[in-house]
Image (cartoon, rainbow, N blue to C red):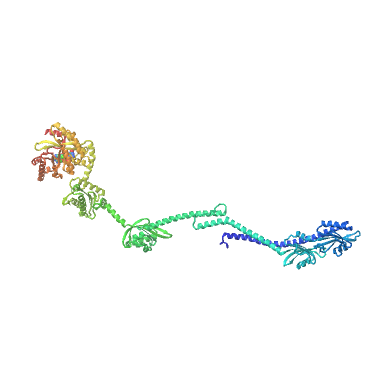
Amino acid sequence: MAFAGHSIKYRFMLLIVLVAMPIAFFDVYHENQEMQRSTIKVSEDLMRSTDTVVGKVQDIIESSHDLLVGLAVVDQISGGDRQACSRLLHKVGVRYSKYTNFSVVNQDKYIICSSGPLPKPVHVANSPNINEAFATKAFAISPFKFGVLSGKPILVFSEPLLDQNNKVVGAINNGLSLTWLGEYFASVVTLTDEHIVVFDDKGVVLASYPEGHFQEGSVVKDASLIELVGQQGSGTGNFTHRDNIEMMAAYGGIPNIPGGAHVVSFASLDVLQSDMLVNLYRRLAVISLLTILSLILVWGGVRVLLLNPIDRLVASAEALAQGNLKVRSDVANETSELGRLGLAFDQMAEALAARTEAVEETKQALRQSEAKLRAIFQSTNVTALISTDAMGNLVTWNPGAEKIFGYSEKEILGQPVSRLVPEQFKEAHNAGLNRAANTRVYHIIGKTVEMTGLHKDGREFPLTLSLGVWDVGAQKYFSAVINDITERKQAEKKIHQLAYTDPYTGMPNEAFFLERLNENIDQNNQGFVASVELSGIGDIIGTFGLEAAELIIYQTGKRLREQLNSQSVVARTGERLFKIVFISNDPSEVVHLAAIANRFFQIACDSFELMGSSVFVNVSMGVSIIDPRESTAKSILTDVEISHHEAKNSITSSLVFFEKSIKKQLVRSTQIVARLHSAIENKEFQLYYQPQFNLKTNTIIGCEALIRWPEKTQGWISPAEFIPIAEKSGRIEEITTWTVDEASRAAASWIAETGLKLRVGVNISAEELDSQEFLHYVTKFIETSKLPPELLEIEITETAIMKDVAMATSNLRKIHDMGISIAIDDFGTGQASLAYLKNFPINRLKIDQSFVKSALTNKTDQHIIASIVNLAHLLDMEVIAEGVEVEEHIALLVALGCDDVQGFYLARPMPEDQFVKFVKSF
Ligand code: C2E
Ligand code: CA
Ligand code: CA
């Protein structure tokens, strides 16, 4: 399309011009036609003017004739009375003013009367019209002539006056002035620039219009006009007038006028044509004006109604194109096409904005996630993020990868990933890669695996690898997240160490011990498990300080470890507790496991050098030999526990191997604990009394109260068995208070029954000696008891005193101050330094049965007894020997200076009533 490049306004202009042009063409054509039609019409108009003038003149001639005919018969005219004739003519002349003159001539052709003044008779014998009227006896017309009086062109008409004999006697005449003709022309012309001229055959102008165009009386000089008119009759034609002006003319002749009278009406063709042209131009101008006007109107309309909205739409569209999505058409409505276009545009913009916003949001999210990913990818110099193509060539490499593997992105990109794999794993790695590429089965995708990596510097290091796979089209890519776990491995090792190490000694801890134990049990290995505990360290701390204790514990651990083989372990499992798993797969060693265990024990028992002195600690050790067929970790730990428990019951160092009997004993003690409770509640206990004798006086001086428990199902339970159990299970105080109460009550009653004041000895446990409650109890007891305090004696062992010397001393002093007697039981078996004894308020020593038993055969024991006796006496104490079973004992003890005795030989412990009887009968 040729106008495709032009703006819409030019198209509209063109459209209007295209519309205007045919109108103009039509107009020009129409004007041309019009011109032709006009030419015809002009010639017709001219013709009509000419005919009108000719007709008018003929009419006037006719009416002149009629007038003259009428006048001719009037008497005043024909009668010969000049006066009367003149008067009448005057009247007529006034009446018909277009006639110049009325006259009457007589037979002699003298004017005898006239309408105007006539001074004397005028002879008109040369008047052609009069002559003709005389001759023809008919109406006659003169040629055009200029009036004698007026000088104006006139026509003169004559009518003969006839007598009865039809003889001419005169004539009546009137002269018609042609001046009015000129005036008359004005009413005849219809065309602008129309001229009328009347001239005779000689070309003399008689009348013309407009006045003065032709001089009346002058001769027409236009030859072509004369030539045109020369032809008789009437017609139309052109002639050249004066300065070569082309004229159109219509001509006609007035008949009957002698000398001829031609009437020509004409008009200038040029003027006519120029008129037409002016007309045409005017119309063209109007058309052009209209065209321009309509152009302006249309343009304005188009601008307002079409172009402006379109411009706005265009501007909006351009703004939209430039990215302004908020722009709206501003022309939207439902009613017009443009409005709908605007609406559609707005909807489009709306949709575009929404879509752009959505796209923008998506892009934003994408950018964010990309930035995030990039940030993650770039920021981490801890984690390696790498990817490879399907061939295993590296395509991405982040700072973390550089940090971990040592290669910069530049030097490694494009290289095979196998460069990061140590030589010994390369084959497997390549095989895996090939398999993945060929089978598309990825075993380790999505898993994290531990591997070994190869650093640029050749160093191998542990790493974790998580592999991912993704596609771009048909192309596969692998991505890997890799972390260097060297530190983690070290930390794990450290944690393992921490978890399995005693922080204080650096030795393995219980967890480690248990792990090893489980391992070896699972493997059915042979050996033993032992538990070693140090005790008596409290005293060492008191003497040498805390560091000494720490040193001893550390040293013990060290000594024990020195006895180990590679499979075995010593762990520190408590403050002063060690556990040993000793494993031996050497058959010759296996038979000596007990000896090996003993060696451990002996090593632990060895003295320590502290500040120049040798120090011993008590060691308890429980051992259980592993039976590969039966032992479980749990059972063997229980066995070790049982045997160690047994070992701990010993006051001195002790090593106990697990035996089934020990276990039985443990079971029994557990049962006893259970039954003790109800025994105390139900008062199942009884007190037996064993008499004590004075060797000098041979009298009963008192007794020892011994508890008895007649248990329903098991028979008698020895106090030697249940008292330690009661002590450990916290029930001893209830038993003791009951014993003290019962014994005191009995002793008090004996005074009444026998009259004898017998001292009663009650056994007190170590726990009570150290207890404030017991002291309060005793204080209250003394206040309320009927028994004199000196008849009550408490028996305590050396060991009980040594447990807490300060407390024991204080409490014993208070008890002693109350008047109660104090005896040291089982003297010689404990570790009491004799030096202490002098500080204690002790009344009596009870020499232990064991010395008495062996004294008969063992000289040393005799010496010991003698020494004790001497020492006691030196310190102002009495001495009683226990376990006197035979007569020889008595003799010996007498010989050794002992004061009192107690034993089966003299009397067994017995119930109260028997005792009373015994005393009475003694
Ligand atoms: P212990 O205090 O040394 O009591 C003396 C033990 O020797 C008594 O044993 C007694 O029956 C026994 N005995 C006496 N003469 C002879 C003898 O000639 N030969 C032999 N082989 N044994 C003799 P029992 O009654 O079985 O008491 C054992 C231990 O139980 C007592 O030893 C004492 O430590 C404790 N015990 C007994 N009764 C009580 C009590 O009421 N309270 C407390 N705390 N302990 C008690
Ligand atoms: Ca006793
Ligand atoms: Ca005793």
In this orientation, does residue 806 appear? Answer: yes
**Residue nearer the viewer, 770 or 857:** 770
Q: Residue furthest top?
A: 752
The percent position of residue 7, horizontal first and vertical second, equals 56, 60
**Residue nearer the viewer, 487 or 530:** 487
Q: Left or right? Give the position of 755 relative to 380.
A: left
The percent position of residue 208, horizontal first and vertical second, equals 76, 63
Q: Left or right? Give the position of 760 relative to 263.
A: left
Q: Quadrant of residue 263?
A: bottom right
The percent position of residue 845, horizontal first and vertical second, equals 13, 41
**Residue nearer the viewer, 114 or 378:** 114
Number of marks in picture: 0
Question: Which quadrant, please, contains the C terminus?
Answer: top left
In this orientation, does residue 625 appear? Answer: no
Q: Is residue 548 above or below residue 111?
A: above
Q: Is residue 237 above or below residue 768?
A: below
**Residue nearer the viewer, 24 or 693:** 24
Q: Residue furthest right?
A: 165
Q: Quadrant of residue 442?
A: bottom left
The percent position of residue 438, horizontal first and vertical second, equals 39, 61
Question: Which quadrant, please, contains the N terminus?
Answer: bottom right
Q: Residue furthest left?
A: 895
Q: Residue furthest bottom?
A: 223
Residue sitting at x 19%, y 35%: 781
